[in-house]
Amino acid sequence: MGTSVQVTPLCGVYNENPLSYLVSIDGFNFLLDCGWNDLFDTSLLEPLSRVASSIDAVLLSHPDTLHLGALPYAMKQLGLSAPVYATEPVHRLGLLTMYDQYLSRKQVSDFDLFTLDDIDNAFQNVIRLTYSQNYHLSGKGEGIVIAPHVAGHMLGGSIWKITKDGEDVIYAVDYNHRKERHLNGTVLQSFVRPAVLITDAYHALYTSQTARQQRDKEFLDTISKHLEVGGNVLLPVDTAGRVLELLLILEQHWSQRAFSFPIYFLTYVSSSTIDYVKSFLEWMSDSISKSFETSRDNAFLLRHVTLLINKTDLDNAPPGPKVVLASMGSLEAGFARDIFVEWANDPRNLVLFTETGQFGTLARMLQSAPPPKFVKVTMSKRVPLAGEELIAYEEEQNRLKREEALRVSLVKEEEIKASHGPDDTSSEPMIIDTKTNHDVVGSHGPAYKDIFIDGFVPPSSSLAPMFPFYDNTSVWDDFGEVINPDDYVIKDEDMDRGAMLNGDDVDGRLDEAAASLMLDTRPSKVISNELIVTVSCSLVKMDYEGRSDGRSIKSMIAHVSPLKLVLVHAIAEATEHLRQHCLNNICPHVYAPQIEETVDVTSDLCAYKVQLSEKLMSNVIFKKLGDSEVAWVDSEVGKTESDMRSLLPMTSAVSPHKPVLVGDLKIADFKQFLSSKGVQVEFAGGGALRCGEYVTLRKVGPTGQKGGASGPQQILIEGPLCEDYYKIRDYLYSQFYLL
Amino acid sequence: MASSSLKRREQPMSRDGDQLIITPLGAGNEVGRSCVYMSFRGKTILFDCGIHPAYSGMAALPYFDEIDPSTIDVLLITHFHLDHAASLPYFLEKTTFKGRVFMTHATKAIYKLLLTDYVKVSKVSVEDMLFDEQDINKSMDRIEVIDFHQTVEVNGIKFWCYTAGHVLGAAMFMVDIAGVRILYTGDYSREEDRHLKAAELPQFSPDICIIESTSGVQIHQARHIREKRFTDVIHSTVAQGGRVLIPAFALGRAQELLLILDEYWSNHPDLHNIPIYYASPLAKKCMAVYQTYILSMNDRIRNQFANSNPFVFKHISPLNSIDDFRDVGPSVVMATPGGLQSGLSRQLFDIWCSDKKNSCIIPGYMVEGTLAKTIINEPKEVTLMNGLTAPLNMQVHYISFSAHADYAQTSTFLKELMPPNIILVHGEANEMMRLKQKLFTEFPDGNTKIMTPKNCESVEMYFNSEKMAKTIGRLAEKTPDVGDTVSGILVKKGFTYQIMAPDDLHVFSQLSTATVTQRITIPFAGAFGVIKHRLEKIFESVEFSTDEETGLPALKVHERVTVKQESEKHISLQWSSDPISDMVSDSIVALVLNISREVPKIVVEEEDVVKSEEENGKKVEKVIYALLVSLFGDVKQGENGKLVISVDGNVAQLDKESGDVESEHEGLKERVRLAFQRIQSAVKPIPLSAS
């Protein structure tokens, strides 16, 4: 029997939640992606928490939050300890993305799900692979080979091929078949007939109408139109993924048009991002590496883009129209949110979305049609403590220290009593820490959610299809009234406590890793206030997601034509649509499991290995067909010295077999071939080909399917007895090999 | 066939193996023009494509005449040095080579700069030029890039590369053809230095290791001692107010020395007022490449990169020409060329050589006949460029930073890998022999073969590569026991084999099967019964039925061809194509035509059909004899009705009755047996059911 393969989605099926899937191959558990969303909703990770400790390897496919956001948290809190595999850019840019997420969050809230240290720890032991590197796992995974291949979409983006005993399991999500400025298209189409393909149906219902050139033109026209009337343009972007493509477009256009409007790229890690990206040329498109090889022209040596890492630099920039690319794309945190609030009420300004916002975020709300006229946002700011608060903080700190010292001494006493080893002493204070942290999370966990999701809270338990539904402003007002202001007062106090506990941790970390990132070292607190923002600026959405659209997805899957197909990551409607399409046209085994539903996609393939003896092979004459060669063998089974099955030539007379015609006849190609031989051919009705005067040729039975999954072709040739008939039959035979 | 079987008899040890040939076209018992040809199971690979720096024009090329460039599938370039890559534009543009070329990203970027510079500075006549700048630019389009560890497959040849140390982008190639692995190290170094990783130890042991032997049996000084000597000399010289000249080749080791200097200056603030220059426009251009391909360097440099790019030097400034140089006090200048033949390094040497406060450090391998080689021996006087002589007072130091593996590294590398076959290339003949002798003592068990082929001398090896096939699908539903038969379609793709049932072909491969149904109409006005009667006379099986829809009569002949009466004037034949059915249908057509034309002949034919058994037997025998003669030539009638067949002195006896063959030669026996089997099945009547 074949290799056993089970797929269990942990997150991100029948909706657009982050991606995380468990694939078990002969008992070896792979976690494919470990994503989280911009809201850092811990309830999404519950399924993961149940299996985290049993995972043997993690494979990451893209350097954004949706694909790797939960890694630090899972490593720290959920007991995930498996080695992580990723390409160098995914590792590096993923790390920067997480830094940016953390710092953005920290700035506006008391964020304690993970720390910078946790991020570093999580990424420290990533095993970095290059594209098409066959990495042989050892130990428990002996015999399994993993290899990342080009996926497109983001720099370093990978589709993963997991091979065991010659059977391939391919995990391909968010790939892009089209070549872009900085990336090559995916190589997914080079894999044919894998045992299992796990892919997303995210864009199954989406068709992109505009050609790249026209889209670029629209994009730039929209921007310049707003700049010319004196408006500012905000592009909410991700930290280090799709933003690279946008930077290149703007950079290129600015050089051509000699624009003087400044472009700012503002994230907490923008300068390191670009520094690293400059050294990732071998991961980019052929044209970029070619231009470097011939003229040493690094495409990411940006001449028109200013890299900023804090907002004051932007505020100090000369006034006047400008383009700002800022993170996060969801507008839930980061500089983009601040800038949006500042700029939203000026009708000259433009907020240009380049991708669909994550579900339930401010960006998604603004992308709805018609866009809301007002949005309520809660703006939070970290301010240093002063006056009485500072004194109170210091007292609190001292008290904590004293308590801790007391506890340590108590523990020590206990230990001496129990004559424990010295190891426990050091770990004890940490336990206290986590306990306190935990309390903080628990006390305002649910309320916390309310701050960041306005108007719409997705029921996390729901698996049913959900469509974005946005309340009108009036209803929304009602909702606002429900909130009790007292909750906020209490929360602020809670946040202070959180900040106190975590403050030192963060600051110590920063000096080390990101000297460029500034954060106040003084004790600080977060203050929040609610704003109602009038959205009078233009809101435009354009597709720069860099994913294949529905039509391409279908033809790609048809080309790959897996023996079994698993669909994930799309709203229910899209999943169902693609499932039906594939069932009808591609393969009979299409699965779309629910969260925590395990589907067994073990191939029902029977196989055994034999040795081909030299004696047998010397009598086999191969015929070349495409890139493979075929022959008919009749053989007898014997044993080699090493007790291996071996095929020997027949000793008794061979009973003749039913002849097989091998080949793939395309009627259109055959028509050309015939006309090149001087035969008059034309298409008659019903797909029949009329050859000469009398003979007709047609394909019968199910047709129109690629990949030959349908079975043998049926070709019918008919005509009266005449010379032409035999001539055309001979031509037809020449298209096949007879075995 | 005959010649190969002869060869196999000469080599009884490796009877059933496939021949693998390795021929150095350059770098065999010499240093320079690396180029090694390899061929196995119809696949051909060329490793490296260099020139010999000591010769010019065509004489510098490897011996390309020995091979047919058009047969080469893949050309792999290990690194950018001239003796490994510089004949590539020639080979790509001026020969019939049409295969694919691979090198790493960094190698490709520097290759262009280096060769363009080489074309500019080489002072040979136009006729002697092997290629020009245009050829280099054209070659850039044909070169494909490969990343470290990335597996690439071309025509069934799988290959990937490991870091080799030596210089930026240097690679060792592992090639896998049908399970036989060959490792070509190129130039490699197992020692990690300031920016490069040490050569990796491949995770698989190769069957053949083609390894460089530049350093022979020498052992290098430890790196930190060399570095200390280097910095000590410089520090003491500049402290005394002297100037330091470091003549170095623009690329490779120069970057390492710059890193050492920059770091030393950073750690010694007292030196900050003393300038360091590197004077090489080429090195300056290449700095962008070094600044970009940080990721192919070692962890040390990558960690530094997290803070700032270490190749953006803080204490070192570029120098374009001697006119820009203000020689006002102590300074350190690294200048090209490394041999002090001419150019900036020589200009500075001429100015500085007579002052005993100054120093000159030679950091690497010197070519015979250059001034650098001469001054190592510290002569009293030297000849300046203007022809005058001057006293040589400056101190000359030779501190080797060469990044070739020394004996210790080579022997441990080979001991870890334990390749059964070692081929030494890229080494001076004497050094190579010494290395070979010493390696023999390291591998005394005699299982390891060490070879040192000269240029154009082929090494032949035989590999018994087992061909494994995977039987899949319906055919594999039951695992067969010994003696069972397995029949199916064998599909070969690259070097992997699969056996499957015809019905599964479309499932497991991109191929598909087809059935062709033929329908032919023949005018026939006679009674259908006549046809039935005639068919029954000829064919063993004729079934009569009536078409359910039309109620017209139909006949199924030989279970293959359906004959139907379509109308009063037509009958139709329908069958699905295969050779036997085609034949049956042809004979039916002939028969039908004969009925309508030559009715009276029926009786005569009928007599013909009935032939005596004896006559038949004789005819069969004749046919068999004639066919065997056409196949084997010398066939005689032997005793007991046996046929004696002799081919190339081997004799086989064939029993016509049983089909048994007796022969001492296994191959001939098998062939005769098979031929007889096939002939017999051809002359016998068609069996009723094929399947």
Image (cartoon, rainbow, N blue to C red):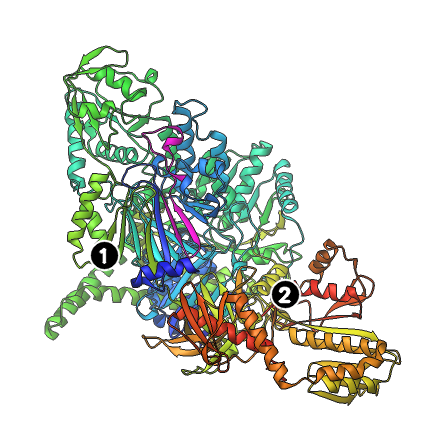
Query: Which residue does the numbered mark 2 point to in the structure image?
Result: A736
Quarter of the image with the C terminus of chain A is: bottom right
**Residue in the image at 69% along x and 81% along y:** B560
Q: How many marks overall? A: 2
Q: Is residue A191 left or right of residue B151?
A: right
- Look at label 2 and name its amino acid: Phe
Q: In the picture shown, does residue A11 fall above or below A656? A: above
Determine which of the numbered discs, if any, sits on residue B60 in the image: none
The foreground one among B140 and A722 is A722
Q: Which quarter of the image is occupied by the N terminus of chain A?
A: bottom left
Q: Which residues are magenta?
A: B36-64
Asked whether residue A120 is in view, the answer is no
Query: Which residue is pictured at 38% across the width and 25% down the height?
Result: B122
In this rendering, the answer to whether B539 lies above or below A229 is: below
Q: Residue B391's spot in the image, x, y percent?
A: 16, 14
Residue holding disc 1: B448
Pointer 2 local density, CA inside 10 Å: few below 14, some 14–19, many at least 20: some
Q: Is residue A564 or residue B573 the one in the foreground?
A: B573
Using residue A135 as the reference point, say whether residue B409 is left or right of it: left
Chain of residue at mark 1? B
Mark 1 crowdedness (10 Å alpha carbons): few <14, some 14-19, many ≥20: some
Q: Quadrant of residue A214?
A: top right
Amino acid type of the residue that numbered disc 1 sits on in the rendered structure:
Thr
From the top left corner, tell me how far across and down residue A347 is, in percent: 63, 44
Query: Does residue B22 show up magenta in the picture?
Result: no
Q: Secondary structure at mark 1?
A: loop
Q: Nearer the viewer, residue B277 or B32?
A: B32
The foreground one among B195 and B455 is B455
Based on the picture, tell me whether residue B43 belongs to the magenta stretch. yes
**Residue at the image position 17 percent from the left and 26 percent from the top:** B376
Vertical order, A699 against A651 (above or below): above
Q: Chain of mark 2?
A: A
